[in-house]
Image (spheres, rainbow, N blue to C red):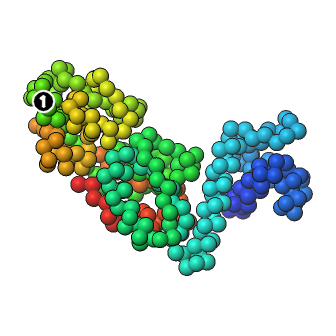
Amino acid sequence: MARSDINRSGEIEVFVRVVEAGSFSAAARALRMTPSAVSKLIARLEARLGARLVSRSTRKLQLTPEGSAFYESGLRILADMAAAEREAAAGAAPRGRLRVNTYVPFGVHRLIPLLPRFLERYPEISVDLVLTDSVIDLMAERADVAIRAGQLGESRLVARKLGQSPMVVVAAPSYLGAYGTPRLPAELDRHNRLAFGFARYSDGWPFADGTSFTVPVSGNAMVSDGEAMRLMTIAGAGIARLARWHVEPDIVAGRLVPVLEDFNPGDVEPTHAVYVGHGKHLPARVRAFLDFLVETVRMA
């Protein structure tokens, strides 16, 4: 059980000051503490974390890899605390830089079209947006919110579900005209199945015909994100399996055609916004953004 008498914010502030000052003695002078008190505080912090943060084997202070990671996290925590205090002093008006990381299809087709409304509603917020289908470490990347597709693994992060969409196997009319339309999942062996180039995606496509089974993904192309997959499929490069919301406009327009729908297992891909913190400790800019997403995003 965590001790209630530990001043974690104070420990973080002292550690950050030690790193920035370059020595215990310089940090002690800036903090109006004794060098021995600073040294003991850092030692207690290391003991509680179970990790060495600072190397003491040289005259010059050097951070361990764990110390470098903790320093970056500490900077963000202190910045969020300062922002929270400023927001409280200003009547909790959302303001400041909002760092958002999102998977590419959501960013292109859902978030970017909505951002002008969000920025008009909250003129004191500026958005720093990164699009990638790679799963990032929020603390390492100093992101406030990450928007992720698929089932979430075990994590200390907090998540808000934004919606979900069924999956669909699709191909372009030009591809089907050249190579034929598969009528059974087994016929996919004769087709080019486009794959993603990251490990978190399954090696096979699920199907159902009384029983559930998968068909391996095998083709001559791999892509880094869902939007690249969609564009390659429209171009006639092969067959893909994507979230229905992502390709529904292409299906309606005739650019893509669903195939093997009689064997669709009915699985869905959820989309979540994940973030650090909750409740009253959540910065107003983050809370405003999450509420806006829940209000405006449609994934059907």
Nearer to the camera, 59 or 49: 59
Classify 256 as above or below 93. Answer: above
Dot 1, how many residues are within 10 Å of its Cα: few (below 14), some (14-19), or many (20+)?
some
Classify 204 as above or below 113. Answer: above
Quadrant holding the N terminus: bottom right
- Visible in this render: residue 6? no
What is the x, y in percent for residue 195? Answer: 31, 30
Horizontal side of 54 relative to 176 (left or right) equals: right
Nearer to the camera, 197 or 48: 197
Circle count:
1
Nearer to the camera, 38 or 133: 133
Q: Name the residue under label 1.
A: 176
What is the x, y in percent for residue 37? Answer: 86, 55
Horizontal side of 213 relative to 100 (left or right) equals: left
Image point 55% across, 65% down: which residue? 96
- SS category of the residue bearing label 1: helix
What is the x, y in percent for residue 6? Answer: 72, 59
Classify 101 as above or below 187. Answer: below
Image point 22% across, 45% down: which residue? 247
Quadrant holding the C terminus: bottom left
- Visible in this render: residue 63? yes
What is the x, y in percent for residue 169? Answer: 20, 37
Image point 74% across, 46% down: which residue? 46
Image point 42% across, 49% down: which residue? 102
Q: Indicate the amino acid at tag 1.
A: Leu
